[in-house]
Image (spheres, rainbow, N blue to C red):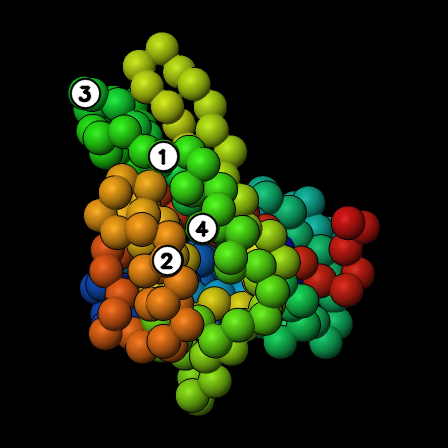
Amino acid sequence: MRYRATLAYDGTAYQGYQRQLDGVPTIQASVERAVSKVSQQAVHVLAAGRTDTGVHAVGQVIAFDVDWAHGNETLLRAINANLPDDIALQDVRQQEGFHPRFDALARRYCYTVMCSAQRQPLLHRQVWHIKYDLDDVALGAVSALLIGQHDFATFGNPPQGDNTVREVFVSEWKIEPTPYGKLYRFTIEATAFLHHMVRRIVGMQIDVAGGRFDLEEFVQRFGSADLSLATTLAPPQGLVLEKVRYPDDDN
């Protein structure tokens, strides 16, 4: 039976999602070990997307095939009991024929930037810390340019093939004042993403908001579809895969 599950993890200690050489810590390898131990079967775990080294998730979606006769909740508890503390299934259910990658309609990521004069130690695994002020109006203007169907080759290479056209449904910043500075949260939802696309998009928006170059130059670089014109790659720890959307979702 095929099982579908939602997976959350802190990616700090892992070399990305995808399994690598023996001994290299990855999310996929950790989950496969746990499911195999519980089921006593060889398991290959599929995922909606392959997050990079240091990137987190609260809504990664995975699937695996096992024979199991003890109910979904029992399977959920058993797998989580065999996962490290920084990885946990949030739910699990049977769904025959489900494929987390090919069935997905869209993926949503959130990136968090902390703008403060001093480091915030409790946030250092979750944010990109910058010490200079940002132009909030410029951030809103540049993020709006990303909505729609465009060639995003300036921001990354495709994981497979050579198609760099993607459709973005949501691209917006929310700003939260705090006692020690401003917390900036960027949400982007699209059909799919290029390699490092979100981190380059965030980095180049921060370049505009920080005064490195203006909105007009961003438009020119975006329109060029030329990866060599990309500037700042935002660090991985601020990025979280929040949700993968499917046709059978309620919202």
3 or 1: mark nearer the eye: 1
Label 2 sits on what residue type? Glu
- Gap between marks 3 and 4 measured at Cα: 27 Å
Q: In the rendered view, does 225 fall on the left or right side of 230?
A: right
Q: Residue at x 75, y 72 (%)?
A: 96
Disc marking residue 142? 4
Numbered mark located on residue 118 in the image = 3
The mark nearer the N terminus, 2 or 4, is 4
Q: Horizontal and vertical percent for residue 219? A: 40, 63
**Secondary structure type for disc 4:** helix
- Residue on which the image places disc 1: 135
State whether residue 21 appears in this view. yes
Q: Extreme bottom residue here?
A: 161
Residue 18, image x, y percentages: 37, 67
Count residues near mark 2 (Cα–Cα under 10 Å), then give few for <14, some for 14-19, many for 20+. few
Q: Name the residue type under label 3.
A: Gln
Q: CA distance from mark 4 to mark 1?
A: 11 Å
Q: Disc 2 to disc 4, how far (Cα)?
A: 10 Å
Using the image as rendered, state which of residue 179 and residue 204 is in the foreground: 204
Can you identify the residue that label 2 sits on? 216
Q: Residue at x 23, y 60 (%)?
A: 231
Which quadrant is the N terminus positioned in? bottom right
Which of the two labelled residues, at mark 3 and mark 2, occupies the earlier sequence position?
3
Per the model, the C-alpha gap separating discs 3 and 2 is 32 Å
Q: Residue furthest front?
A: 216
Question: Tag 1: residue type?
Answer: Asp
- In the figure, residue 68 lies in which quadrant? bottom right
